[in-house]
Image (cartoon, rainbow, N blue to C red):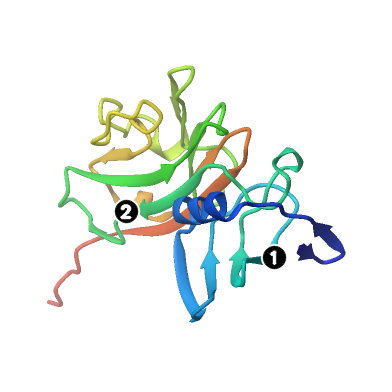
């Protein structure tokens, strides 16, 4: 049984398929006992969140889950897009770099129809970059408009990851701030944020 508040869900998973699911979906795991594991997962837009405990033939597995599922996915596990790594330079000296690259590495599966990648700057609601792979459409706006190398692609042959990254030309101090990568699909969504600071050279005292 899976219990979240007053909600209960019956899980019927065969041992082999359950173990296969664990291998493919766990991101970080930490053993608490020989038969108990705790795993943290990303965000997925839906209803059921919390601690999930499953038992299969004497073995117990526990997940502290931030990821949730839409109703049509049985609300037990969220098989949707997950951001694995967000790469944003923490410190950049003004005037010293021709370009910097911000990358958002994610995984997805067949449930992730209509995948969309968006980048946000600070708390602005309008994305500074948006890419819709299925339509081949990319759009820039705001502080990054005219400052991105739109010919840049990450080193991948995956058509749904090719233009996920931002290559910003000649970063300057006004680009300091929080950058958020949001990846959405019909199955769910995940997001991560990181600060980048572009600092000026210190003037020596006279």
> Hey, which residue is sitting farthest front in the picture?
57
Query: Residue at position x 34%, y 45% from top?
Result: 103
Relative side of 136 to 92, left or right: right
Q: Position of residue 62 (x, y in %)?
A: 60, 70
How packed mark 1 is, by other alpha carbons closer than 10 Å (few <14, some 14-19, many 20 or more), is: some
Image position of 158 with respect to 73: above or below: above
Tag shown at residue 127 = none
Task: Give whichever of 98, 129 is nearer the camera.
Answer: 129
- Mark 1 and mark 2 lie on one chain; the one further toward the N terminus is 1
Image position of 151 with respect to 38: above or below: above
Q: Quadrant of residue 1?
A: bottom right
Q: Position of residue 33 (x, y in %)?
A: 51, 82
Residue beneath label 1, please?
Answer: 50
**SS of the residue under disc 1:** strand
Q: Quadrant of residue 41?
A: bottom right
Task: Give whichever of 200, 12 is nearer the camera.
Answer: 12
């Amino acid at each position: 049984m899976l219990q979240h508040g007053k909600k209960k869900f019956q899980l019927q998973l065969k041992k082999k398929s359950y173990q296969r699911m664990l291998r493919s979906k766990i991101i970080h795991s930490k053993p608490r006992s020989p038969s108990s594991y705790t795993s943290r997962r990303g965000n997925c837009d839906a209803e059921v969140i919390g601690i999930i405990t499953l038992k299969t033939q004497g073995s117990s597995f526990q997940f502290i889950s931030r990821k949730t599922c839409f109703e049509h996915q049985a609300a037990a596990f969220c098989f949707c897009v997950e951001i694995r790594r967000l790469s944003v330079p923490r410190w950049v000296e003004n005037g010293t770099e021709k370009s910097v690259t911000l990358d958002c590495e994610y995984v997805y599966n067949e449930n992730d129809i209509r995948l969309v990648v968006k980048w946000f700057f600070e708390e602005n609601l309008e994305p500074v970059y948006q890419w819709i792979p299925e339509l081949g459409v990319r759009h820039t706006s705001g502080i990054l408009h005219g400052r991105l190398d739109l010919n840049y692609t990450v080193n991948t042959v995956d058509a749904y990851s090719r233009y996920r990254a931002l290559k910003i030309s000649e970063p300057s101090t006004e680009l300091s701030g929080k950058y958020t990568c949001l990846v959405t699909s019909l199955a769910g969504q995940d997001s991560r944020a990181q600060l980048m600071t572009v600092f000026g050279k210190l003037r020596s005292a006279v």
